Image (cartoon, rainbow, N blue to C red):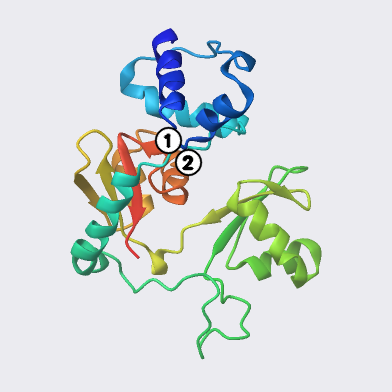
């Protein structure tokens, strides 16, 4: 820990542009201190670092992004895109895309959703956000609040919400090994990756990794969608 602290001070002296090092120069190193908040070995250091930065959102420590991993992923997406897209049953269409078939149907989001009534404990699956809004609140305009809650696994209108994968709109994913920085695994969907690697987990780790490319890993990989 002391060695790491000394390295931060040294990088500050070398005019590093990192926020913490700028703060050292502007405010003085004597106005900062270091203390231990967790223990781990090197194999999970990056994961622990990202966890605590994400938890505390410190002013001088933005979440680290593996820029080299991002570049690898960009190249990989172009290289493997044709093959990986063939894994998907149908071409992916992002949320909000309208077609002559679904316009005005209330199902344009393509997002199936599950709501758990916090009072009764009953879970109900809905074919779209709009349908859920109408049945739960009677007002289709509340779909935005429900969608926000579902994306975070949060609560709205007395229900805990969860987005369900639409089997007709799968998105292929691939994993970049965080140590070797090589693409090693490819799956037709996030759900398939969870089934193969999840070991009983519900896949929240891979969701976090997919939403924050290059920041968080799951099962030893940084995860990316095939765009």
Left or right of 123 in this view: 201: left
**Which label lies toward us, 1 or 2?**
2
The tag on residue 151 is none
Residue shown at 56%/24% (left/top)? 24
Residue shown at 76%/71% (left/top)? 141
Q: Residues within 10 Å of mark 1 (few under 14, many from 20)?
A: few
Residue 48 in sight here: no
Residue bearing the label numbered 1: 201
Q: Are marks 1 and 2 in contact (CB under 8 Å)?
A: yes
Q: Quadrant of the C terminus?
A: bottom left
Along the line of sight, the residue nearer the viewer: 61 or 81: 61
Residue shown at 61%/31% (left/top)? 58
Residue 166 in sight here: yes
Instruction: Indicate the secondary structure of the residue bearing disc 2.
Output: helix
Left or right of 66 in this view: 127: right
Residue bearing the label numbered 2: 204
């Amino acid at each position: 820990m002391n060695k790491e602290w000394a390295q931060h001070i040294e990088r500050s002296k070398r005019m590093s542009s990192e926020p913490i090092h700028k703060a050292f120069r502007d405010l003085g190193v004597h106005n900062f201190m270091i203390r231990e908040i967790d223990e781990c070995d090197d194999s999970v250091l990056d994961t622990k670092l990202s966890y605590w930065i994400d938890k505390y959102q410190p002013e001088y420590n933005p979440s680290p992004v593996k820029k080299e991993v991002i570049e690898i992923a960009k190249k990989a997406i172009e290289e493997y895109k044709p093959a990986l897209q063939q894994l998907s049953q149908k071409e992916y269409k992002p949320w909000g895309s309208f077609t002559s078939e679904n316009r005005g149907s209330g199902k344009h989001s393509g997002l199936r959703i599950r709501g758990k009534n916090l009072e009764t404990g009953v879970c109900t699956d809905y074919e779209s956000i709009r349908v859920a809004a109408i049945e739960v609140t009677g007002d289709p305009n509340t779909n935005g609040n429900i969608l926000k809650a579902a994306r975070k696994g949060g609560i709205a209108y007395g229900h805990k919400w969860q987005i369900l994968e639409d089997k007709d709109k799968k998105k292929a994913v691939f994993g970049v090994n965080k140590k070797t920085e090589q693409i090693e695994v490819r799956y037709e969907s996030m759900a398939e990756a969870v089934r193969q690697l999840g070991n009983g987990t519900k896949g929240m780790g891979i969701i976090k990794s997919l939403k924050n490319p290059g920041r968080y890993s799951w099962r030893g990989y940084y995860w990316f969608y095939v765009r």
